[in-house]
Amino acid sequence: DVMVLPDPAACGAAVADAVADALTGAAGGPVNLGLATGSSPLPAYAELVRRHRRDGLSFRAARAFLLDEYLGLPRDHPQAYRQVIRRELTDHLDIDPAAVHAPDGTASDPAAAAADYERLLTAAGPIDVQILGIGRNGHVGFNEPGSAPGSTTRVVALTERTRTDNARFFDRLQDVPHRVLTQGMGTIGRAAHLVLVATGPDKAPAVAAAVHGPVTTALPASLLQRHPHCTVVLDPAAAAGL
Ligand code: GLP
């Protein structure tokens, strides 16, 4: 399902609609939200905060699970994804702070932390709505090219391209961690509804390959073609290669 909308704000509203539908459609049980970081979902997060404040959209039933986390940043580092998601979204909602989960990027045993997070996700049950961005090399979460379709939460070494792309959030390139924890493609694929958002011309080649190219581990986002309910939300610049 591909939606091309006039601008990033309209894309954010469409992503917010998917989240709001899950929250308001729930029959009283918990609603599992899968959250991505990066700049692409920020208009959606701003819109969700607006709807909470303006319309009383409640997140009390929500549990949030981050896709990924840098390894080795101090817990309170402003670019640790746990901090980013608090600052951009959850601190401004009525969600229980204890219900906001992320892989533990400070763990002394990262492989054990990855296994713990996968277990937590399995116990929580399927994610109802999973928000996703896409890297210029087609990565999803931090599943770099070569990630297996059935992969689970694990330690990944970032490509230099991804480190360079993410350097804008740090003072210097050398501050960008080399390793991360990420949900795997198999983990992500268990979500009931995937909503991938991409805006701007830099994403156009990866979006075109993900939507119309062959399904290949060389471009992890292409694996999402096999998912039964995946919505791709684009602005005209990101859709230019379709
Ligand atoms: C990061 C994140 C991804 C995100 C991607 C794109 O590497 N781990 O989850 O989708 O970058 O980021 P942006 O939306 O800032 O372009």
Image (tube, helix red, strand yellow):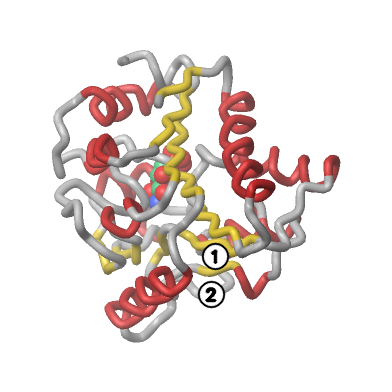
Quadrant of the drawing holding the N terminus: top left
Q: Position of residue 51 (x, y in %)?
A: 77, 41
Q: From the viewer's perspective, is the residue at label 1 or at label 2 nearer?
A: 1
Q: Residues within 10 Å of mark 1 (few under 14, many from 20)?
A: many
Q: Residue at x 62, y 24 (%)?
A: 10
What amino acid type is highlighted by mark number 1? Arg
Q: Residue furthest front?
A: 27
Spatial distance from mark 1 to mark 2, Cα to Cα? 8 Å
Disc 2: which residue? 75
Observer able to see residue 37: no
N-terminal-most mark, 1 or 2? 2
Query: Which residue shows up at 37% across the image and 42% down it?
Result: 165
Image quarter for ligand 1 equals top left
Task: Give the left or right position of residue 200, taking residue 162 as reference.
Answer: right
Residue 159 picture location, percent across and down = 23, 51
Amino acid bearing label 2:
Arg
Disc 1 marks which residue? 82
Q: Tell me, yes or no, whether the two marked residues, 1 and 2, touch with CB atoms within 8 Å.
A: yes
Q: Residue furthest bottom?
A: 108
Near-viewer residue (44 or 31): 31
The relative height of residue 241 versus residue 103 in the rendered view (above or below) is: above
Please tell me whether residue 103 is drawn above or below residue 213 in the rendered image: below
